[in-house]
Image: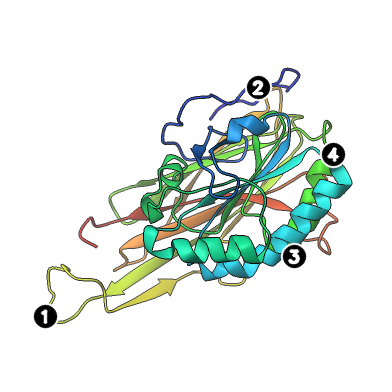
């Protein structure tokens, strides 16, 4: 995991096309460049260095994206007025067949910020470079080019933006990354890397689930799609793992956990959440969390 240094010098985004990577909280944001369907010409994320940037991957065909759009626009326009130094940057995952929906919602909601579009749908260059597998996917990037939060939406979007922009210059981003390894016996080894810039304790939780697929009787080799799936979670009410991570002389630590096997499952998915220090009293004591997630497929043919 990259250790985050004290940000006293402005870090520049590379002005070249980004290479594929999986963006996590605490990582430097790779540049994005593409045709801007709102303002014409070419839009580049790096053109907005020095500002807070709310990066939104969305599409006109995506129901949850369109459902969230009014709230996102209301909150981002509000913080732009109240704080300044703030920019929204959109990336469309529309295909040529849904371009009409993209333009419909841009016009309907009077969107005036850059939105890149290349017609590739899920194969959109920018989404592949940022390893996007589901939308809406959002990233809040600080003026130094570091990702400080992901997947902000709904009722937590406004308070989260207030927290980060209200602490501009004082808030130092934590670091979070994770990876999972198939142990070969159905169990999974989970590795979590955390960075606490001021060495304060961090609370983290892990939720995980297994998926069991059923295939048609005439499909013994599982060559077609499953006919049904079952999600299995050991504790649906609480996180399966909950820990407090303390830090000593160094601000980074690694943690390992073993996720037990569940017989007959084909996949395991997990989410690691970390509560941001200073947000313990927000949302009626629930706090503000950042997250990272991943999954393991146990059998390639499933």
- Choose the circle earlier in sequence order: 2 or 1: 2
- Choose the circle earlier in sequence order: 2 or 4: 2
Taking 214 as reference, is 10 left or right? right
Real-space Cα separation, disc 2 to disc 1, in angstroms: 57 Å
Which sits in the foreground, 188 or 137?
137
Query: Do the residues bearing badges 1 and 4 touch, measured as CB atoms within 8 Å?
Result: no
- Choose the circle earlier in sequence order: 4 or 3: 3
In this rendering, does residue 279 appear at all? no
Q: Check residue 55 in the rendering and tell me which mark sits there, or answer none.
A: none
Q: Residues within 10 Å of mark 1 (few under 14, many from 20)?
A: few
Look at discs 3 and 1 and give the one toward the viewer: 3
Q: Quadrant of residue 146?
A: top right
Determine whether the residue tagged by mark 3 lies in a helix, strand or loop: helix
Real-space Cα separation, disc 1 to disc 4, in angstroms: 60 Å
- Choose the circle earlier in sequence order: 1 or 4: 4
Pointer 4: what residue?
167
Which sits in the foreground, 101 or 49?
101
Pointer 1: what residue?
218
- Choose the circle earlier in sequence order: 3 or 2: 2
Figure check: 248 above or below 194: above
Residue extending farthest bottom: 217
Pointer 3: what residue?
155
Real-space Cα separation, disc 2 to disc 4, in angstroms: 19 Å
Q: Position of residue 237 (x, y in %)?
A: 61, 72
Pointer 2: what residue?
11
Taking 190 as reference, is 136 left or right? right
Q: Residue at x 46, y 31 (%)?
A: 18
- Choose the circle earlier in sequence order: 3 or 1: 3
Q: Residue at x 56, y 40 (%)?
A: 24
């Amino acid at each position: 995991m990259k250790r985050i240094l004290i940000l006293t010098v402005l870090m520049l985004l590379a002005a070249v096309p980004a290479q594929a990577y999986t963006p996590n909280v605490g990582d430097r944001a790779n540049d994005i460049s593409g045709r801007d369907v709102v303002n014409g010409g070419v839009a580049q994320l790096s053109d907005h260095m020095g500002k807070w940037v709310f990066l939104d991957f969305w599409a006109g065909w995506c129901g949850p994206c369109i459902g969230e759009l009014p709230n996102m626009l209301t909150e981002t326009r509000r913080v732009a007025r109240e704080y300044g130094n703030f920019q929204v940057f959109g990336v469309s995952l529309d295909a040529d067949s849904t371009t009409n929906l993209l333009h419909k919602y841009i016009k309907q909601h009077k969107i005036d910020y850059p939105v890149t579009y290349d017609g590739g749908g899920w194969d959109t260059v920018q989404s592949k470079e940022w390893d996007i597998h589901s939308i809406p996917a959002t990233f809040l990037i600080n003026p130094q080019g570091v990702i400080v939060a992901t997947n902000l939406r709904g009722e937590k979007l406004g308070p989260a933006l207030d927290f980060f922009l209200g602490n501009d210059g004082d808030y130092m981003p934590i670091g979070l990354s994770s990876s999972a390894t198939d142990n070969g016996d159905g169990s999974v080894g989970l590795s979590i890397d955390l960075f606490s810039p001021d060495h304060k304790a961090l609370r983290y939780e892990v939720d995980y689930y297994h998926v069991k697929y059923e295939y048609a009787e005439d499909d013994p080799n599982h060559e077609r799609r499953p006919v049904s799936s079952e999600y299995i979670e050991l504790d649906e009410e609480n996180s399966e793992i909950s820990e407090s991570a303390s830090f000593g002389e160094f601000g980074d630590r690694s943690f390992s956990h073993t996720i037990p096997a569940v017989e007959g499952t084909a996949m395991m998915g997990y989410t690691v959440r970390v509560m941001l220090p200073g947000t313990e009293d927000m949302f009626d004591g629930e706090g503000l969390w950042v997250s990272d997630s991943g999954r393991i497929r146990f059998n390639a043919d499933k």
